[in-house]
Amino acid sequence: MKSRIIRDILNRRTIVEKEAELMVLRYLNRNTDFQPRIRNQAQQALSNTTSAAFPTHASNRCLETGKGRGIMSKWRLCRFQFRLKALSGGIPGVHKSSW
C-alpha cells in the first residue's frame, strides 16, 4: 500500500474523530449569547487545532493506486481503475453504455 493511501486513510480517521469537538467549538465561537471570554477560548482552541482535523484538508485519492487526479468521487477510484473494474463487472450497476 502506498504511503499516500495510508496518509489519506489516517487523515480521514482524524477528521471523523475530531468532528464532534470542532462542531462544539464552532458553536461556542459563533453564539453571541456566551460571554466574550468563553468565545475567545473557543476561538483559541480552534486556531490551535491541527489542520488535519478539518475536512478541507482531505484530498480525494484513488484507493487502488493513490493517484490524486481524475477521481470518481462516488467510488473513490481514478478514471482508469474505474474503467477496468466497470468492464470486468467489479462495480455493481455500472456497465458500458452504447447508443
Image: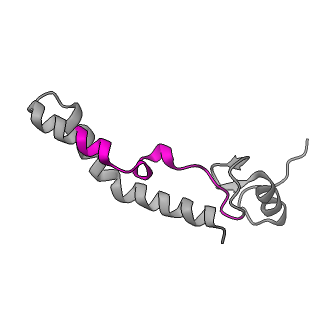
Q: Position of residue 89 (x, y in %)?
A: 79, 65
Q: Position of residue 54 (x, y in %)?
A: 42, 47
Magenta highlight on residue 55:
yes
Above-or-below relation of 63 to 25: below
| Residue sitting farthest toward the right | 99
Above-or-below relation of 86 to 44: below
For the N terminus, give its image quadrant.
bottom right
- In the figure, is residue 29 to the left or right of 17? left
For the C terminus, give its image quadrant.
top right
Above-or-below relation of 13 to 34: below
In which image quadrant can residue 16 be found?
A: bottom left
Residue at the image position 29 percent from the left and 43 percent from the top: 46
- In the figure, is residue 37 to the left or right of 6? left
| Residue sitting farthest toward the bottom | 1
In which image quadrant can residue 24 be found?
A: top left
Residue in front for this viewpoint, 99 or 20: 20
Magenta highlight on residue 90:
no
- In the figure, is residue 66 to the left or right of 18? right
Residue at the image position 68 percent from the left and 51 percent from the top: 68
Residue in front for this viewpoint, 27 or 99: 27
Q: Position of residue 39 (x, y in %)?
A: 16, 35
Q: Position of residue 96 (x, y in %)?
A: 85, 52
| Residue sitting farthest toward the top | 32
Residue at the image position 18 percent from the left and 35 percent from the top: 40
Above-or-below relation of 99 to 93: above
Specify start and end residues of the magenta stretch as a single range: 43-64
